[in-house]
Each structure stands twice: as structure tokens, then as C-alpha cells.
Image (tube, rainbow, N blue to C red):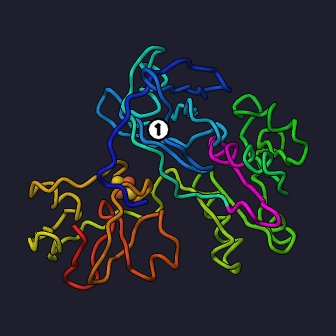
């Protein structure tokens, strides 16, 4: 996961497909000969858009494919420029720089059963997982919640599998699905996965709170906690011995970039994992949604774009 110096790759937009209402997919191919870096189900890539915005999107195609990446994008009414730009300005034939695949939502392939829960466009990494589980012949079940059928990506392909519970808000008097019985009634040994809007993820985390953390897997598309920018502490860069003061209203990343220290970053809200940095000394104030509870408690790494410091000083492996 710690590939902060990873190179970008240029890809060609070979085709754009209408998937559902306000949902399109980009089929991204290598420029020239060769293959793309391998990925595993649940991975995402960063698209570096011409409007200067980096945006992270899950890969929806089967993980054995090396000739393309397939990303599916819903036009978000509250878009800050990412999904709107892709829908309105990206064209077939464009060349886009992308970051290599990164996976914060990995599939446990040998689980006795997997229960996958997707809300809306959260289906994209889950669809990739379904294709992998199906290829492996593993036991799985999907709960797919969508506001309407016409806005549900991959619906026909997914329903063809049969072991799918589809919940359509519009056909249920607007009621959201109750996740508690779904989780409670899953067979023992089940691994649980959820990707969807924040209220669904919150309900999922409540419903799975008593389960072992290693059996619960969540993918966030946006932050759930505010970033920590109180500042007022020192960051020591262990490799150079340099000390950088993080002023008030600054994140660690802000302070490092202002000091001319180039650190890989993308989402700036603790979602993508690009800025993950090893902690050698000190206690971070974790605000990301990438690290598990156990990883947070170990304080071995942190996301410096959003997390702060509880110990007055941090020594980082930079
Ligand atoms: S830049 Fe995405 S987690 Fe920090």
C-alpha cells in the first residue's frame, strides 16, 4: 500500500458506456503496446483529470484482465468537479494520466461465505468482487440497494446470478433496507463487505460492531470525520532529520508541501490511502477511513492529509 513514489500511467479512453441513469463507464486501455499493472478485486485507481482534480474510482472489471481498467462513475449532483467533469468533458480518444491500482477493500478469497452489501454506485467494487467470487466458485450473496431500477448499474448482469436481494427504495415507499436481520442471519464464518452512501455505511458499522474486525470490510467514497487541522506541533522527518512545524489551520500534508517536501497525495480527505506514511514515534489523531480499528490502534501508519497529532510531536518515515 505504501507506494508514495508510484509513477503515473497514461491510459486511452477507448469507449464510454451508458450503464444507467446518470451512470457511465470508461473503458481505459494502455497507450501503445503492453498491459496494465495487475489489480485485485476492491481496488481503485486515481484519475488525474484535465481540470486538475485527482479523483479515485473503483475498478469494476474482472481482476484477471490486464488489457483494461473499467471505471464506473455516477454524476453526483453535489459534484465538486470530478464526476461532473467526467460526464461532461471526458471524450473517447482522450489520454488520461492515472495512478496505479491501490486496494483498501481487499476480498478474503477463502472465506466460507461472503455477504456483499452495495448501495447505489457503491456497487462498483462489489461487482468486481462478485466476478472474482463467481470465478473462484465461492459462496456469496449480494444485497443491492438502489433508489430506482433505472439508476442501478450492472443490474441485469447481477440479477442473472440469482443469489441477489434487490432493494429498490422507490418500490418500498422510500424505506431503506434494515441491515440488522441481514447481518444477524448470515451463516457463521461469513465475511461482510459494504460500499455505499454514508448513512448505509453507518448502519452497517452499527450492525457489525460486535463481530470480529477482520470479518468486516468497508469502503468509503467520502470522509466521515472532519479533517484534523488544529496544528501547533512538530513533525520530524526521520530520513533527513528535518523538523517541520505544522501551523494552526494546517494539515501535516499542507505543512510538508509548503516546506517544499513532495509527498504523494490525492483525495485530501483520508479516503484513498495515497498519503499513508509510517509513524516512527508519536501518537497520531486518526481521521481517515482507510485504516482498520486495529491498524489505528497500532499507530504504525497514518494518513497525513487528514490526521493530526495527540503527542505534541510526530516522527515520520519521510
Ligand atoms: S490523500 Fe487520500 S488518504 Fe490522504
Foreground of the two, 306 or 108: 108
Residue 81's spot in the image, x, y percent?
Answer: 38, 33
User: Which type of secondary structure does the marked residue at label 1 adopt?
Assistant: loop
Residue 66 seen by the camera: yes
The residue under label 1 is 78
> Is the CB atom of the residue marked by disc 1 within 8 angstroms of ligand 1's nearest atom?
no
Q: Where does the image place residue 295, in percent across and percent down from the top left? A: 47, 76
**In the image, is residue 80 part of the stretch drawn in magenta?**
no
Horizontal relation, residue 69 to residue 234: left or right: right
Quadrant including the N terminus? bottom left
Between 186 and 76, the one lying in front of the other is 186
- Relative to 277, say whether 170 is above or below: above
**Residue 224 percent location from the top left of the image:** 48, 61
- Is residue 124 highlighted in magenta? yes
Q: Position of residue 217 (x, y in %)?
A: 63, 64
Considering every residue shown, the one lying at the far right of the view is 162
Q: Quadrant of ligand 1?
A: bottom left
Q: The magenta stretch spans which residues?
A: 108-129
Position of residue 216 relative to residue 49, above or below, is below
Q: Quadrant of residue 308?
A: bottom left
Closer-to-camera residue (251/62): 62
Q: In screen coordinates, is 154 left or right of 86?
A: right
**In this image, 164 relative to 262: left or right?**
right
In the depicted structure, whether residue 143 falls above or below residue 97: below
Image quarter of the C terminus: bottom left
Label 1 neighbourhood size at 10 Å, few (<14), some (14-19), many (20+)?
few
Rendered image quadrant of residue 154: top right
- Residue at 19% from the left image edge and 63% from the top image edge: 249
The reply to whether residue 269 is in sight is no
At 34% across and 38% down in the image, what residue appears? 8
The residue that appears at 78% across and 38% down in the rendered structure is 170
Q: Count of labels shown?
A: 1
Amino acid at each position: 500500500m505504501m507506494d508514495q513514489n508510484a509513477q503515473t500511467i497514461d491510459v486511452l479512453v477507448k469507449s464510454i458506456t451508458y450503464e444507467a441513469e446518470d451512470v457511465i463507464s470508461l473503458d481505459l486501455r494502455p497507450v501503445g503496446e503492453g498491459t496494465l499493472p495487475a489489480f485485485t478485486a476492491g481496488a481503485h485507481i486515481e484519475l488525474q483529470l484535465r481540470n486538475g482534480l485527482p479523483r479515485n474510482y473503483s475498478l469494476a472489471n474482472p481482476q484477471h484482465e490486464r488489457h483494461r481498467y473499467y471505471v464506473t462513475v455516477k454524476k453526483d449532483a453535489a459534484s465538486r468537479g470530478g464526476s461532473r467533469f467526467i460526464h461532461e468533458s471526458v471524450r473517447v480518444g482522450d489520454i488520461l494520466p492515472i495512478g496505479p491500482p491501490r486496494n483498501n477493500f481487499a476480498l478474503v478469497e477463502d472465506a466460507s461465505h461472503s455477504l456483499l452489501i452495495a448501495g447505489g454506485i457503491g456497487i462498483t467494487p462489489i461487482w468486481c468482487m462478485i466476478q472474482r467470487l463467481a470465478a473462484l466458485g465461492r459462496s456469496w450473496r449480494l444485497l443491492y440497494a438502489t433508489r430506482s431500477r433505472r439508476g442501478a448499474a450492472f443490474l441485469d448482469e447481477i440479477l442473472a446470478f440469482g443469489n441477489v436481494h434487490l432493494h429498490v427504495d422507490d418500490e418500498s415507499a422510500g424505506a431503506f433496507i434494515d441491515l440488522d436481520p441481514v447481518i444477524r442471519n448470515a451463516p457463521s464464518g461469513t465475511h461482510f463487505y459494504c460500499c455505499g452512501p454514508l448513512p448505509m455505511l453507518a448502519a452497517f458499522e452499527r450492525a457489525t460492531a460486535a463481530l470480529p474486525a477482520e470479518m468486516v470490510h468497508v469502503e468509503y467514497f467520502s470522509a466521515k470525520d472532519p479533517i484534523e487541522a488544529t496544528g501547533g506541533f512538530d513533525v520530524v522527518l526521520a530520513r533527513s532529520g528535518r523538523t517541520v512545524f505544522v501551523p494552526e489551520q494546517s494539515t501535516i500534508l499542507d505543512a510538508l508541501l509548503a516546506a517544499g517536501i513532495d509527498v504523494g497525495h490525492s483525495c485530501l480527505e483520508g479516503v484513498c490511502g495515497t498519503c499513508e506514511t509510517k509513524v516512527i514515534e508519536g501518537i497520531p489523531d486518526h481521521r481517515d477511513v482507510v485504516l482498520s480499528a486495529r491498524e489505528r490502534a497500532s499507530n504504525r501508519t497514518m494518513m497525513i492529509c487528514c490526521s493530526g497529532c495527540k503527542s505534541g510531536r510526530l516522527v515520520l518515515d519521510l
